[in-house]
Amino acid sequence: MDIGTLTLLILASMATLLMLGVPLAFVSGSIAVVLAVTQFGLNSLFIVGSRTVDFIDSFALIAVPMFVIMASFMEKSGVARDLYRALHVWAGSLRGGIGVVTIFVAVILGATTGIIGGEIVLLGLIALPQMLRLGYDKKLAIGIVTAGGSLGTMIPPSIILIFYGLTAEVNISQLFLATLLPGLMLASFYVIYVLIRCGLNPAMGPALSVEEQAMPLREKLALFKGVALPVAVAGGVLVSIYAGLASITESAALGAFGAGLAAWVRGTLTLDMIREVFIQAMRTCGMVFWLVFGTNALIGVYNLMGGIDFASEMLSGVSENPTIILAVMVGVFILLGFFIDWIGILFLTMPIFLPVLSTLGYDPVWFGIVFNLSMQIAYLTPPFGPACFYLKGAAPEGVTLQDIFAAQWPFIGLQVLALLIVLLWPDLSLWLPRLVYGGG
Amino acid sequence: MVFLSQFAKWLGRTASWCFGAIILVMVYEVVARYGFGAPTAWAHEVSVMLAGFAFIFGGAYCMAEGTHMRISVLVENRPTLEHLSHWLSVAAGLTYLSGLAYASWRMADRAIWRFALDGTWTPERTGSSFNAPVPAFLKGMLFVGAVLFLVVLVNEALKRRSSPP
């Protein structure tokens, strides 16, 4: 069989296994094993094992459980609730004010975590009932929560960028800097959208009641007391990474330690909570890393078959024009995003895209941000929109999955706009890393 | 062999404390570096071994807990596919895990079963100044982890056969 036929066969069997509900951890791994044995014989299974060990044997990877632990400590000690409480009193008489506050909270939470699931669940539990109580338009309120909650990976630290950095061999701190402005830009698009919609039609997002607005300034400020320490921890982690005081993994571990300490100061830390937090990290890692083991193995075998070269050549053969090739890559991200998770997309496409990218002379740091933004879209798009599923689990009664999916389209539009801006104007993302690291 | 599924859960809960140990090691490393100007030689390699242990046994743990990610939309809408989905999952799991177990056995064998000419044991090491046997450890653990994962998978499949849904 020639490589083209094999490639189609691989894609078809992956799609079949995925759709039939085979655990993602087994899908690509089983295909890799079958391919290795049938194409090269038993000895070639070696690559399935060696790529797995190479992947685990990485100090940078440990940042992932550390950030998960930091986020769970924050989550379980009630930081999100207090943060929301401290900020929502400032919304005042502004139409759509609570919606805007929710986006602010999402951005700040994004800086304490790098994963989206927890954040959406928290906003779904805390902010969504508030907005619905005030009589916000259901779709608008839902969209704010899912789109805002997804910002977690656009605001550093970001698990997506850690994995991208490891795959593309790009400095992760630079990626964290590069994503900052595009992430804030996307957040400000959401804010502007909410303000315009509510400005045009006040019924979409009414202001707080007069009694709620009447809180004295001193009380408003006092609400910040509870959140000052956790937010300082999150800020400290970012400073430590950006200033190069400690490696990302070390900074993340210090953040986990600090978040635990903050929970202790707040009087919410218990042994059970610590146990829960570590087990949560274990679950996330067991799930995500075993999925990566399998995908990594498949990529290794596919490369051995000359598949990567084949796919790269096919990709560069699409057109003489680098812009069109770039458009094809982004199109593939978005298309796959309808069906599979970001981590699957990353490990399946990057080995093929990255060599092409370097021959075309594009900046891999910038491309990481393009990927990250594309994954924002992937979070929201049905039928496999993880953000929507997370919210469904936490949403109040009467909010159906149909409601949630229907609410996404305007926000997806804003994400596409942000993606286009970053594509057409790379300096938006590259300006900060250049400023800090020089060069370019 | 059902007790091995219980063992996988227990091992997963226990191994999760590795993350706590890593946090303490990292805090110690940073304090030693900035506070005392004396960075450790061992913090990174010890962390990689602790984390590797947790990552590897996380597979069997998630299997025993039933938390591995799958796309269940289609199967939920068409319950007739449930049976096919289950056995296809078992078949794919068996294929992958036995392949991985075989591969890691060969690698572990080569990395651990090494002796110098004078007969002293020389497992594969990192070659750094601390020179921990990280590669030998990870390869050995990967074999054990893949086999345990496999056993848990078989247990789940058998459980299903003895009590149809």
Image (cartoon, coloured by chain):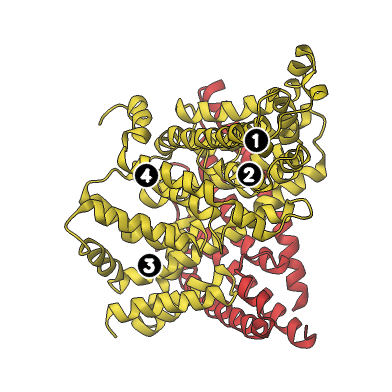
Chain colours: A yellow, B red
Q: For numbered disc 2, what is the local secondary structure?
A: helix
- Quadrant location of the C terminus of chain A in the rendered image: top left
Classed neighbour count for the residue bearing mark 2: other residues with Cα under 10 Å, few (<14), some (14–19), many (≥20): many
Q: Mark 3 belongs to which subunit?
A: A
- Observer-nearest residue: B125 or B9? B9
Question: Residue A192: which disc?
Answer: none
Label 3 vs label 4, nearer the camera:
4
Residue under numbered circle 3 = A300
Which label's residue is closer to the chain start, 4 or 2? 2
> Which amino acid type corresponds to the residue marked 2 in the rendered image?
Leu
Give me the C-alpha separation between circle 3 and circle 4: 33 Å
Q: Mark 1 belongs to which subunit?
A: A
> Which amino acid type corresponds to the residue marked 1 in the rendered image?
Gly
Q: For numbered disc 3, what is the local secondary structure?
A: helix
Classed neighbour count for the residue bearing mark 3: other residues with Cα under 10 Å, few (<14), some (14–19), many (≥20): many
Give me the C-alpha separation between circle 3 and circle 2: 44 Å
Residue under numbered circle 1 = A99
Residue under numbered circle 2 = A140
Which label's residue is closer to the chain start, 1 or 2? 1
- Observer-nearest residue: A50 or A203? A203
